[in-house]
Image: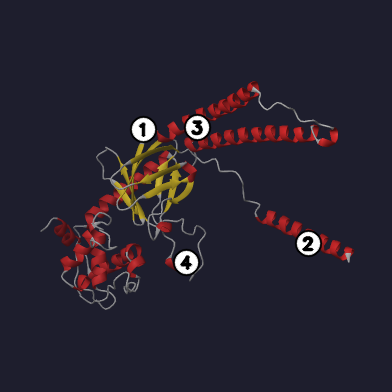
Amino acid sequence: MLNRLRFRSLTTAVVFIAVGLLSGLASAEWQVNMTRGVTEISNDVYNLHMLIFIICCVIGVLVFGVMFYAMWAHRKSRGAVAETWDQNHKLEVVWTVIPLLILLGMAVPATITLAKIYADDPQADVTVMIEGYQWRWRYTYIDDSGEAPVSFFSSMSTPRESIANVVDKPENYLLEVDNALYLPTDRSIRFLITANDVIHSWWVPAFAVKKDAVPGIINTANTFILEEGTYRGMCAELCGRDHAFMPIVVEAVSPEAFDDWMSEQRAEAVALAELTSKEWTLDELSTRGQQVYNTFCAACHQTSGQGIPGVFPSMIGSPKVVGLPDETIDVLVNGVRGTAMQAFGNQLSDVDLAAVATYIRNSWGNNMGDVIEPMDVINFKAGL
Protein backbone atom coordinates (compact mmCIF):
# COMPACT_ATOMS: atom_id res chain seq x y z
CA MET A 1 0.00 0.00 0.00
CA LEU A 2 2.82 2.36 0.95
CA ASN A 3 4.67 1.60 -2.29
CA ARG A 4 1.49 2.28 -4.30
CA LEU A 5 1.10 5.71 -2.68
CA ARG A 6 4.75 6.52 -3.36
CA PHE A 7 4.28 5.50 -7.01
CA ARG A 8 1.22 7.75 -7.37
CA SER A 9 3.06 10.65 -5.78
CA LEU A 10 6.02 10.14 -8.09
CA THR A 11 3.74 9.96 -11.14
CA THR A 12 1.95 13.15 -10.10
CA ALA A 13 5.25 14.96 -9.64
CA VAL A 14 6.46 13.87 -13.09
CA VAL A 15 3.22 15.10 -14.68
CA PHE A 16 3.49 18.49 -12.96
CA ILE A 17 7.12 18.88 -14.06
CA ALA A 18 6.23 17.94 -17.66
CA VAL A 19 3.36 20.43 -17.74
CA GLY A 20 5.62 23.10 -16.30
CA LEU A 21 8.29 22.49 -18.94
CA LEU A 22 5.74 22.52 -21.76
CA SER A 23 4.26 25.76 -20.41
CA GLY A 24 7.73 27.28 -20.36
CA LEU A 25 8.31 26.32 -23.98
CA ALA A 26 4.92 27.72 -25.00
CA SER A 27 5.71 31.07 -23.38
CA ALA A 28 9.26 31.33 -24.73
CA GLU A 29 8.57 34.87 -25.99
CA TRP A 30 6.98 35.96 -22.73
CA GLN A 31 9.03 38.33 -20.60
CA VAL A 32 8.78 39.35 -16.97
CA ASN A 33 10.33 42.78 -16.95
CA MET A 34 8.77 45.93 -18.43
CA THR A 35 9.89 47.01 -21.91
CA ARG A 36 12.36 49.85 -22.35
CA GLY A 37 10.29 51.89 -24.84
CA VAL A 38 11.50 53.99 -27.77
CA THR A 39 11.64 57.53 -26.39
CA GLU A 40 14.00 59.41 -24.11
CA ILE A 41 11.40 59.60 -21.34
CA SER A 42 10.52 55.91 -21.59
CA ASN A 43 14.24 55.09 -21.21
CA ASP A 44 14.41 57.31 -18.11
CA VAL A 45 11.36 55.52 -16.69
CA TYR A 46 12.93 52.13 -17.41
CA ASN A 47 16.24 53.12 -15.79
CA LEU A 48 14.39 54.43 -12.73
CA HIS A 49 12.42 51.19 -12.53
CA MET A 50 15.63 49.12 -12.64
CA LEU A 51 17.33 51.33 -10.02
CA ILE A 52 14.44 50.89 -7.57
CA PHE A 53 14.30 47.17 -8.35
CA ILE A 54 18.02 46.70 -7.59
CA ILE A 55 17.75 48.70 -4.35
CA CYS A 56 14.80 46.54 -3.24
CA CYS A 57 16.70 43.34 -4.07
CA VAL A 58 19.77 44.47 -2.10
CA ILE A 59 17.60 45.38 0.90
CA GLY A 60 15.81 42.03 0.69
CA VAL A 61 19.06 40.06 0.54
CA LEU A 62 20.58 41.97 3.47
CA VAL A 63 17.50 41.81 5.71
CA PHE A 64 16.70 38.15 5.07
CA GLY A 65 20.42 37.30 5.32
CA VAL A 66 20.64 38.85 8.77
CA MET A 67 17.42 37.09 9.81
CA PHE A 68 18.54 33.64 8.64
CA TYR A 69 22.00 34.11 10.14
CA ALA A 70 20.47 35.12 13.48
CA MET A 71 18.17 32.07 13.47
CA TRP A 72 21.08 29.75 12.63
CA ALA A 73 23.73 31.25 14.92
CA HIS A 74 21.47 31.79 17.93
CA ARG A 75 19.34 28.66 17.83
CA LYS A 76 18.42 26.87 21.04
CA SER A 77 20.44 23.75 20.20
CA ARG A 78 23.62 25.84 20.34
CA GLY A 79 22.76 27.01 23.83
CA ALA A 80 21.86 30.56 22.87
CA VAL A 81 20.56 32.70 25.72
CA ALA A 82 18.34 35.72 25.05
CA GLU A 83 19.72 39.15 25.94
CA THR A 84 18.07 41.03 28.79
CA TRP A 85 18.17 44.50 27.27
CA ASP A 86 15.25 45.77 25.19
CA GLN A 87 16.51 49.17 23.95
CA ASN A 88 19.62 50.27 22.09
CA HIS A 89 19.64 53.94 21.16
CA LYS A 90 22.56 53.67 18.76
CA LEU A 91 20.87 50.83 16.86
CA GLU A 92 17.58 52.75 16.71
CA VAL A 93 19.36 55.76 15.21
CA VAL A 94 21.08 53.57 12.65
CA TRP A 95 17.91 51.83 11.46
CA THR A 96 16.17 55.20 11.19
CA VAL A 97 18.93 57.03 9.33
CA ILE A 98 19.73 54.27 6.84
CA PRO A 99 16.14 53.95 5.47
CA LEU A 100 15.96 57.74 5.28
CA LEU A 101 19.11 57.83 3.13
CA ILE A 102 17.71 55.04 0.95
CA LEU A 103 14.46 56.98 0.43
CA LEU A 104 16.40 60.10 -0.51
CA GLY A 105 18.47 58.04 -2.93
CA MET A 106 15.26 56.91 -4.65
CA ALA A 107 13.43 60.25 -4.44
CA VAL A 108 16.06 62.29 -6.27
CA PRO A 109 16.07 60.33 -9.58
CA ALA A 110 12.29 59.82 -9.34
CA THR A 111 11.74 63.59 -9.02
CA ILE A 112 14.05 64.30 -11.96
CA THR A 113 12.13 61.81 -14.13
CA LEU A 114 8.75 63.23 -13.09
CA ALA A 115 9.97 66.74 -13.90
CA LYS A 116 10.86 65.57 -17.42
CA ILE A 117 7.47 63.88 -17.85
CA TYR A 118 5.54 67.02 -16.87
CA ALA A 119 7.84 69.51 -18.61
CA ASP A 120 6.25 71.52 -21.42
CA ASP A 121 8.07 72.51 -24.59
CA PRO A 122 6.16 75.18 -26.54
CA GLN A 123 9.05 75.39 -29.03
CA ALA A 124 8.79 71.74 -30.08
CA ASP A 125 9.44 70.87 -33.72
CA VAL A 126 6.00 69.24 -34.16
CA THR A 127 2.79 70.04 -32.27
CA VAL A 128 -0.25 67.75 -32.48
CA MET A 129 -3.67 68.49 -31.02
CA ILE A 130 -5.33 65.26 -29.81
CA GLU A 131 -9.08 65.30 -29.17
CA GLY A 132 -11.04 62.39 -27.74
CA TYR A 133 -14.48 61.66 -29.15
CA GLN A 134 -16.92 58.83 -28.50
CA TRP A 135 -15.15 56.66 -29.69
CA ARG A 136 -12.35 57.85 -31.89
CA TRP A 137 -9.43 60.24 -31.82
CA ARG A 138 -8.99 63.39 -33.84
CA TYR A 139 -5.46 64.52 -34.69
CA THR A 140 -4.65 68.02 -35.90
CA TYR A 141 -1.12 69.13 -36.78
CA ILE A 142 -0.66 72.71 -35.65
CA ASP A 143 1.80 74.93 -37.50
CA ASP A 144 2.12 78.54 -38.59
CA SER A 145 3.23 77.84 -42.15
CA GLY A 146 -0.01 79.18 -43.60
CA GLU A 147 -0.54 75.97 -45.58
CA ALA A 148 -3.71 73.86 -45.48
CA PRO A 149 -4.07 72.32 -41.99
CA VAL A 150 -3.85 68.54 -41.68
CA SER A 151 -6.58 67.06 -39.49
CA PHE A 152 -8.27 63.67 -39.48
CA PHE A 153 -10.12 61.17 -37.34
CA SER A 154 -8.70 57.82 -36.34
CA SER A 155 -11.23 55.05 -35.69
CA MET A 156 -10.90 51.39 -34.86
CA SER A 157 -10.82 49.29 -38.03
CA THR A 158 -11.40 45.84 -36.52
CA PRO A 159 -14.54 44.48 -38.24
CA ARG A 160 -17.64 44.21 -36.08
CA GLU A 161 -17.98 40.62 -37.36
CA SER A 162 -14.69 39.77 -35.59
CA ILE A 163 -15.91 41.29 -32.34
CA ALA A 164 -19.08 39.20 -32.61
CA ASN A 165 -16.99 36.07 -33.35
CA VAL A 166 -18.65 35.68 -36.76
CA VAL A 167 -15.28 35.79 -38.56
CA ASP A 168 -11.69 35.17 -37.40
CA LYS A 169 -9.97 37.82 -35.31
CA PRO A 170 -7.11 39.73 -37.02
CA GLU A 171 -3.57 39.79 -35.63
CA ASN A 172 -3.98 43.23 -34.00
CA TYR A 173 -7.50 42.65 -32.74
CA LEU A 174 -8.95 45.89 -31.24
CA LEU A 175 -5.57 47.58 -31.72
CA GLU A 176 -5.83 48.68 -35.36
CA VAL A 177 -7.18 51.89 -36.88
CA ASP A 178 -8.14 53.28 -40.27
CA ASN A 179 -5.87 56.36 -39.99
CA ALA A 180 -2.65 56.12 -37.99
CA LEU A 181 -0.94 59.12 -36.40
CA TYR A 182 2.35 59.84 -38.21
CA LEU A 183 5.21 61.27 -36.17
CA PRO A 184 8.88 61.86 -37.00
CA THR A 185 11.86 60.41 -35.18
CA ASP A 186 14.70 62.64 -33.95
CA ARG A 187 12.41 65.65 -33.55
CA SER A 188 10.83 67.06 -30.40
CA ILE A 189 7.06 66.51 -30.34
CA ARG A 190 4.46 68.27 -28.22
CA PHE A 191 0.95 66.89 -27.61
CA LEU A 192 -2.02 69.10 -26.72
CA ILE A 193 -4.64 66.72 -25.34
CA THR A 194 -8.33 67.42 -24.71
CA ALA A 195 -11.74 65.81 -25.24
CA ASN A 196 -14.98 66.75 -26.94
CA ASP A 197 -17.48 64.85 -24.77
CA VAL A 198 -16.35 62.75 -21.79
CA ILE A 199 -13.00 62.06 -20.13
CA HIS A 200 -10.62 59.89 -22.16
CA SER A 201 -6.93 59.13 -21.71
CA TRP A 202 -4.32 58.97 -24.50
CA TRP A 203 -1.85 56.20 -23.67
CA VAL A 204 1.02 54.77 -25.71
CA PRO A 205 3.22 52.56 -23.46
CA ALA A 206 6.25 52.61 -25.79
CA PHE A 207 6.36 56.42 -25.41
CA ALA A 208 5.69 56.41 -21.64
CA VAL A 209 2.94 58.94 -22.40
CA LYS A 210 -0.39 58.63 -20.62
CA LYS A 211 -2.37 61.84 -20.31
CA ASP A 212 -6.03 62.45 -19.51
CA ALA A 213 -8.17 64.11 -22.18
CA VAL A 214 -10.66 66.28 -20.29
CA PRO A 215 -13.35 68.47 -21.94
CA GLY A 216 -12.54 72.16 -21.49
CA ILE A 217 -8.96 71.51 -20.40
CA ILE A 218 -5.81 71.15 -22.52
CA ASN A 219 -3.14 68.92 -21.02
CA THR A 220 0.33 68.80 -22.53
CA ALA A 221 2.87 66.04 -22.99
CA ASN A 222 6.18 65.79 -24.79
CA THR A 223 8.13 63.03 -26.45
CA PHE A 224 11.23 62.45 -28.55
CA ILE A 225 11.06 59.21 -30.55
CA LEU A 226 14.35 57.40 -31.05
CA GLU A 227 13.33 54.45 -33.25
CA GLU A 228 11.09 54.07 -36.30
CA GLY A 229 8.24 51.60 -36.06
CA THR A 230 4.55 51.03 -35.40
CA TYR A 231 3.48 51.61 -31.81
CA ARG A 232 0.06 50.84 -30.38
CA GLY A 233 -1.92 52.05 -27.41
CA MET A 234 -5.49 52.68 -26.34
CA CYS A 235 -7.76 54.86 -24.27
CA ALA A 236 -6.88 54.22 -20.63
CA GLU A 237 -10.02 55.74 -19.13
CA LEU A 238 -13.39 54.06 -18.63
CA CYS A 239 -15.05 56.54 -20.97
CA GLY A 240 -18.25 54.73 -21.83
CA ARG A 241 -19.95 51.81 -23.51
CA ASP A 242 -17.38 51.40 -26.32
CA HIS A 243 -14.34 52.34 -24.24
CA ALA A 244 -12.51 49.24 -25.51
CA PHE A 245 -12.88 50.44 -29.09
CA MET A 246 -10.56 53.47 -28.95
CA PRO A 247 -7.19 52.11 -30.07
CA ILE A 248 -4.19 54.29 -30.91
CA VAL A 249 -1.69 53.51 -33.66
CA VAL A 250 1.40 55.67 -34.21
CA GLU A 251 3.68 55.30 -37.22
CA ALA A 252 7.10 56.70 -36.33
CA VAL A 253 9.01 57.46 -39.52
CA SER A 254 12.17 59.31 -40.49
CA PRO A 255 11.96 63.13 -40.67
CA GLU A 256 12.23 63.00 -44.47
CA ALA A 257 9.38 60.47 -44.76
CA PHE A 258 7.30 62.55 -42.35
CA ASP A 259 7.75 65.69 -44.46
CA ASP A 260 6.67 63.76 -47.57
CA TRP A 261 3.61 62.40 -45.75
CA MET A 262 2.63 65.90 -44.59
CA SER A 263 2.88 67.20 -48.17
CA GLU A 264 0.56 64.42 -49.35
CA GLN A 265 -1.94 65.15 -46.57
CA ARG A 266 -1.99 68.86 -47.37
CA ALA A 267 -2.63 68.07 -51.04
CA GLU A 268 -5.52 65.77 -50.06
CA ALA A 269 -6.96 68.49 -47.80
CA VAL A 270 -6.94 70.95 -50.70
CA ALA A 271 -8.56 68.36 -52.99
CA LEU A 272 -11.25 67.64 -50.38
CA ALA A 273 -12.04 71.35 -50.07
CA GLU A 274 -12.45 71.55 -53.85
CA LEU A 275 -14.98 68.68 -53.74
CA THR A 276 -17.46 70.93 -51.94
CA SER A 277 -18.02 72.91 -55.15
CA LYS A 278 -18.51 69.81 -57.28
CA GLU A 279 -22.03 68.80 -58.41
CA TRP A 280 -22.43 65.22 -57.20
CA THR A 281 -24.73 62.53 -58.55
CA LEU A 282 -26.99 60.34 -56.42
CA ASP A 283 -24.85 57.24 -57.03
CA GLU A 284 -21.60 59.05 -56.15
CA LEU A 285 -22.97 60.39 -52.89
CA SER A 286 -24.63 57.09 -51.97
CA THR A 287 -21.42 55.14 -52.51
CA ARG A 288 -19.39 57.58 -50.40
CA GLY A 289 -22.19 57.87 -47.86
CA GLN A 290 -22.31 54.13 -47.30
CA GLN A 291 -18.61 54.13 -46.32
CA VAL A 292 -19.16 57.03 -43.94
CA TYR A 293 -22.26 55.37 -42.45
CA ASN A 294 -20.47 52.06 -41.84
CA THR A 295 -17.63 53.89 -40.07
CA PHE A 296 -19.55 56.33 -37.90
CA CYS A 297 -23.18 55.20 -37.69
CA ALA A 298 -23.45 51.43 -38.07
CA ALA A 299 -22.30 50.67 -34.51
CA CYS A 300 -25.56 52.17 -33.17
CA HIS A 301 -28.03 52.02 -36.04
CA GLN A 302 -26.66 48.75 -37.52
CA THR A 303 -25.72 48.26 -41.18
CA SER A 304 -29.35 47.31 -41.86
CA GLY A 305 -30.53 50.69 -40.56
CA GLN A 306 -32.88 48.94 -38.13
CA GLY A 307 -31.15 50.23 -35.00
CA ILE A 308 -31.50 48.44 -31.68
CA PRO A 309 -35.08 48.46 -30.35
CA GLY A 310 -35.36 50.48 -27.15
CA VAL A 311 -31.79 51.76 -27.42
CA PHE A 312 -31.05 53.26 -30.85
CA PRO A 313 -33.91 54.22 -33.21
CA SER A 314 -34.45 52.69 -36.61
CA MET A 315 -33.51 54.75 -39.67
CA ILE A 316 -36.20 53.11 -41.78
CA GLY A 317 -39.08 55.53 -42.28
CA SER A 318 -37.90 57.78 -39.43
CA PRO A 319 -39.39 61.32 -39.71
CA LYS A 320 -35.91 62.76 -39.17
CA VAL A 321 -34.67 60.76 -42.16
CA VAL A 322 -37.54 60.97 -44.66
CA GLY A 323 -38.68 64.47 -43.65
CA LEU A 324 -37.38 67.75 -45.06
CA PRO A 325 -33.70 67.65 -46.08
CA ASP A 326 -32.81 70.33 -43.52
CA GLU A 327 -34.19 68.13 -40.72
CA THR A 328 -31.82 65.32 -41.75
CA ILE A 329 -28.89 67.75 -41.99
CA ASP A 330 -29.78 69.27 -38.61
CA VAL A 331 -29.61 65.89 -36.85
CA LEU A 332 -26.26 65.09 -38.44
CA VAL A 333 -24.70 68.50 -37.82
CA ASN A 334 -26.07 69.27 -34.34
CA GLY A 335 -26.97 65.84 -32.95
CA VAL A 336 -30.01 65.27 -30.73
CA ARG A 337 -29.81 66.77 -27.25
CA GLY A 338 -30.44 64.32 -24.43
CA THR A 339 -29.69 61.26 -26.57
CA ALA A 340 -26.59 59.36 -27.64
CA MET A 341 -26.79 60.98 -31.10
CA GLN A 342 -23.61 63.02 -31.39
CA ALA A 343 -23.10 66.27 -33.31
CA PHE A 344 -21.06 65.35 -36.38
CA GLY A 345 -20.79 68.92 -37.68
CA ASN A 346 -17.15 69.19 -36.58
CA GLN A 347 -16.28 65.53 -37.01
CA LEU A 348 -17.13 65.05 -40.70
CA SER A 349 -16.37 67.15 -43.76
CA ASP A 350 -19.21 68.88 -45.58
CA VAL A 351 -18.82 66.34 -48.40
CA ASP A 352 -19.14 63.39 -45.99
CA LEU A 353 -22.13 64.96 -44.23
CA ALA A 354 -23.89 65.43 -47.59
CA ALA A 355 -22.97 61.90 -48.64
CA VAL A 356 -24.27 60.16 -45.51
CA ALA A 357 -27.45 62.28 -45.55
CA THR A 358 -28.09 61.25 -49.14
CA TYR A 359 -27.31 57.61 -48.36
CA ILE A 360 -29.71 57.23 -45.42
CA ARG A 361 -32.50 59.04 -47.32
CA ASN A 362 -32.18 56.54 -50.18
CA SER A 363 -31.48 53.22 -48.43
CA TRP A 364 -33.46 50.41 -46.76
CA GLY A 365 -36.65 51.46 -48.56
CA ASN A 366 -36.23 55.19 -47.82
CA ASN A 367 -36.49 55.94 -51.52
CA MET A 368 -36.60 59.73 -51.33
CA GLY A 369 -34.79 60.05 -54.66
CA ASP A 370 -33.23 63.40 -53.74
CA VAL A 371 -29.62 64.50 -53.51
CA ILE A 372 -28.14 66.59 -50.70
CA GLU A 373 -25.13 68.41 -52.10
CA PRO A 374 -22.18 69.64 -49.98
CA MET A 375 -23.30 73.22 -50.67
CA ASP A 376 -26.65 72.39 -48.99
CA VAL A 377 -24.72 71.52 -45.82
CA ILE A 378 -22.60 74.66 -46.08
CA ASN A 379 -25.70 76.82 -46.51
CA PHE A 380 -27.39 75.12 -43.52
CA LYS A 381 -24.39 75.82 -41.29
CA ALA A 382 -24.44 79.44 -42.45
CA GLY A 383 -28.17 79.71 -41.67
CA LEU A 384 -29.09 80.36 -45.31
Query: Which dot marks residue 121?
Result: 1
Residue position marked by numbered label 4 in the rendering: 162
In the rendered image, residue 180, in percent from the top left (x then y), is placed at 40, 51
The residue tagged with tag 1: helix, strand or loop? loop
Q: Nearer the viewer, residue 30 or 98?
A: 98
Name the residue type under label 1: Asp
As drawn, 266 above or below 120: below
Give me the C-alpha separation between circle 3 and circle 4: 43 Å
Asked whether the viewer can see residue 60, the reply is yes
Query: Which dot marks residue 12?
Result: 2
N-terminal of the two: label 1 or label 2? 2
Q: Quadrant of the N terminus?
A: bottom right
Name the residue type under label 2: Thr
Residues at discs 1 and 3 in contact (Cβ within 8 Å): no
Give me the C-alpha separation between circle 2 and circle 4: 40 Å
| Residues packed near mark 2 inside 10 Å, few (<14), some (14 to 19) or many (20 plus) | few
The residue tagged with tag 4: helix, strand or loop? helix
The residue tagged with tag 3: helix, strand or loop? helix
Q: Nearer the viewer, residue 305 or 106?
A: 106
Residue position marked by numbered label 3 in the rendering: 110
